[in-house]
Amino acid sequence: MNGKAKIPILYTTVQTSYFDICDNTAAIYKSDMRGFYIMYILISSTYVVISACSKYTEQGFTIESKFFKSMMIDGSLIICLWIGVFSYCWLAYLLQMLIINGLNNKLSLLFQHLTQSIVFIFVFALGFTRNWGFTQTLFSLLLALTHFMKMHSYTLTNRDLRESKSKVYPNNINIKNFLHYMIAPTLVYQIEYSSRPSFRKGYFIKKLILFTVQFWSLYNVISDCVLPVLTEIKELNYLEGFCRLIFPVLICYLMLFFILFEQILNMFAEIVKFGDREFYQDWWNSSSFEEFNRKWNRPVHLFLHKHIYLECVKRYGFSEHTAKAVTFVFSAACHEMVLASICRSIKPYLLGLMLIQIPLILLQRLLNRSLLGLYVFWGGMIAGLPLLLTLYTKYV
């Protein structure tokens, strides 16, 4: 790209996600561990059938209805919110049109920060004021966070293109380009992304089936194994509640990972023929939490790296350590905001656990990718998630 400054291009190759069994070029097909993943798919499918049959023979129904009804509260409002937030993001496109037509820098900054903040404040207020369960609150806040990041990236990348006197700007400011970016499973704007030649209908249908099976498996684990513990968590002593949540919560985490990064993101990618589908790397082999944070959620990591870390270093002259601290604080604040809205109170337990990661990261650096580092990482994962859930439900 021509210009005074080099703007990093992050999505350049066509590649599949690691566990994509619907694409025979995926890394899982070249791995000796592929049988274990196929076993997981079969167990998930079987669990849905067995759970439904057991409920029907014992209780006369196939689906636990109380949790389902709580998920359906304000269902139409959630759909309208999704459409509304997506439509609202077009203000980022409007801002670029205004800048092209002469809007000055001060007003454009005011417009940018005001519009980006409003979507956050509105959804956060909804989470606190509506009679929502954790599913609606979590979905709406992740929706707001995702679209906030998309708006921010679109504005900042076009600012960099404008300042670098790029020949492609402002020709890239058009409806087709912006719509493609809004649908694509990425939080970092580029003028062009690597792409696949065509939409694969069969692939999309397979992903939809896998999503349905895995979502229903997750629903059953939550309704059968997690919610019964949470309903009586106040009466249980801390250790008993924690121990009863360890395995169900870990299973839920893994299921959520596959549902989001394997099924949902790949379906959105297929709609726009998005090519670079490295939504995650081998985080399960992480020997430190620093490595895990880089690998488990690549779209968010790339956003934080480009628009928080590099912005602090290159534009504001921060040292690398200070930039890392700012990135950490931003990430921690976003996580706390989500949990505060779900619990309707501010209890910085998650922040505390994230701060504990810092000495653990320093310790794991000394272990230098050793097997012991892997044990420390997985020990933290297995214990950390149920610990958080116990703290937020028992003491809030």
Image (cartoon, rainbow, N blue to C red):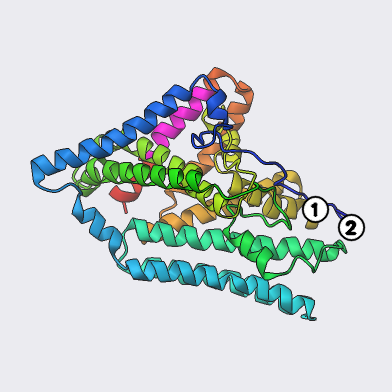
Residues drawn in magenta: 374-385
**Residue placed under numbered mark 2 in the picture:** 3
Mark yes or no: residue 340 visible: no
Q: Secondary structure at mark 1?
A: loop
Query: Would residue 128 appear left or right of 264 to someone viewing this image?
Result: left
Residue 141 on image: x %, y %? 46, 60
Q: Three-letter amino acid code at disc 1?
A: Ile
Q: Secondary structure at mark 2?
A: loop
Front-most of residues 358 and 71? 71
Which quadrant holds residue 321?
Answer: top right
Name the residue at 36% across, 47% down: 212
Name the residue at 37% across, 42% down: 214
Front-most of residues 213 and 190? 213
Front-most of residues 80 and 376? 80
Q: Three-letter amino acid code at disc 2?
A: Gly
Name the residue at 58% across, 19% down: 370
